[in-house]
Image (tube, helix red, strand yellow):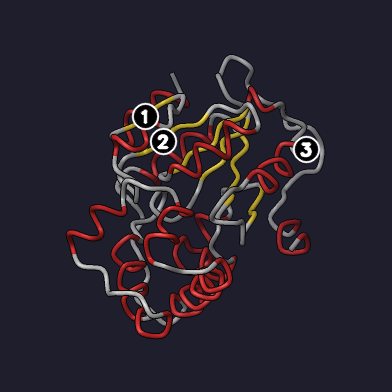
């Protein structure tokens, strides 16, 4: 994995941050945070339902599951850990042959503003590097100093810790942005601020119960947290 990551890093020395900003490093999830991949993933889950012997997800069932973290969803679907891993791999492969999700409105402007402010940008995602290329495109990916793909859906602490180490940044001066309960828990485990966005997978009330540092309903609210 490291050879994939290093090709995106622009400067191995300490970045000259603007210290008046609250965060030196901003780390993003991709699916449900930067790109609207929720409908795509639901379609893929239903496509593989017969193979893994769970019922296809209807609208009511989807809304119910949106209140839970990944481990609970796995149990609700009756999947073993091994089956869940295989299902995730099947979905990643299928994405390569599916219409690509669109970037949420306002995200391009936010990324440009953060970059212009001298903030180090990173991605930590459970998706593959190939799918990040397809959904974000090379021009957007070039804005990021680090790309960490293939993180566990249950926790991203290991990849986030690598970003902190290579950017010489403390956990308190970095922030993780994600749309799932597991994203909040991953950041909290490292003593790191986290902004939960409500336009992705988990419902706002479920995110709020996990007590993120910020709960953002819009990209403008997220921007205000990062660039006050």
What residue would you read off at disc 3?
A: 165
What residue would you read off at disc 2?
A: 196
Where 45 falls versus 15 (above or below)? below
> How far apart are the alpha carbons under marks 1 and 2?
5 Å
Q: Residues within 10 Å of mark 1 (few under 14, many from 20)?
A: many
What residue would you read off at disc 1?
A: 215
Most foreground residue, 144 or 99: 99
Q: Quadrant of the C terminus?
A: top left
Where 216 falls versus 147 (above or below)? above
N-terminal-most mark, 3 or 1: 3
Residue at (49% x, 78% y) in the render:
90
Q: Are marks 1 and 2 in contact (CB under 8 Å)?
A: yes
Q: Secondary structure at mark 1?
A: strand
Tell whether 66 sits left or right of 33: left
Q: Quadrant of the N terminus?
A: bottom right
N-terminal-most mark, 1 or 2: 2
Residue at (48% x, 63% y) in the render:
137
Tell whether 36 sits left or right of 194: left
Q: Residue 217: give x, y in percent of width and height.
A: 28, 34
Disc nearest the viewer among 3 and 1: 1
> How far apart are the alpha carbons under marks 3 and 1?
26 Å
Residue 167 found in image quarter: top right
Q: Secondary structure at mark 3?
A: helix
Q: Secondary structure at mark 2?
A: strand
Residue at (47% x, 78% y) in the render:
96
N-terminal-most mark, 3 or 2: 3
Residue at (61% x, 47% y) in the render:
156
Q: Residue 188: give x, y in percent of width and height.
A: 57, 31
Which residue ends up furthest to the top in the rendered image? 20
Disc nearest the viewer among 3 and 2: 2
Q: Residue 203: give x, y in percent of width and height.
A: 29, 43
């Amino acid at each position: 994995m490291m050879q994939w990551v290093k090709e995106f890093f622009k400067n191995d020395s300490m970045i000259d941050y603007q210290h008046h900003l609250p965060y030196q490093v901003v780390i993003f999830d991709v699916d449900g945070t930067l790109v609207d991949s929720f409908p795509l993933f639901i379609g893929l889950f239903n496509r593989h339902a017969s193979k893994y012997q769970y019922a296809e997800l209807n609208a009511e069932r989807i809304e119910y599951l949106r209140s839970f973290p990944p481990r609970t969803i796995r149990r609700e679907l009756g999947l073993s850990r091994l089956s869940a891993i295989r299902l995730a791999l099947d979905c990643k492969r299928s994405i390569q042959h599916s219409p690509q999700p669109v970037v949420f409105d306002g995200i391009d402007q936010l990324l440009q503003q953060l970059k212009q402010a001298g903030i180090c940008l990173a991605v930590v995602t459970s998706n593959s590097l190939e799918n990040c290329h397809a959904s974000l495109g090379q021009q957007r990916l070039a804005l990021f100093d680090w790309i960490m793909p293939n993180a566990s859906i249950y926790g991203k602490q290991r990849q986030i810790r690598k970003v902190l180490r290579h950017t010489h940044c403390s956990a308190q001066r970095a922030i993780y942005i994600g749309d799932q309960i597991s994203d909040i828990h991953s950041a909290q485990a490292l003593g790191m601020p986290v902004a939960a966005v409500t336009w992705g997978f988990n419902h706002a009330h479920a995110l709020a119960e996990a007590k993120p540092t910020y709960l953002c309903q819009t990209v403008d609210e997220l921007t205000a947290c990062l660039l006050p």
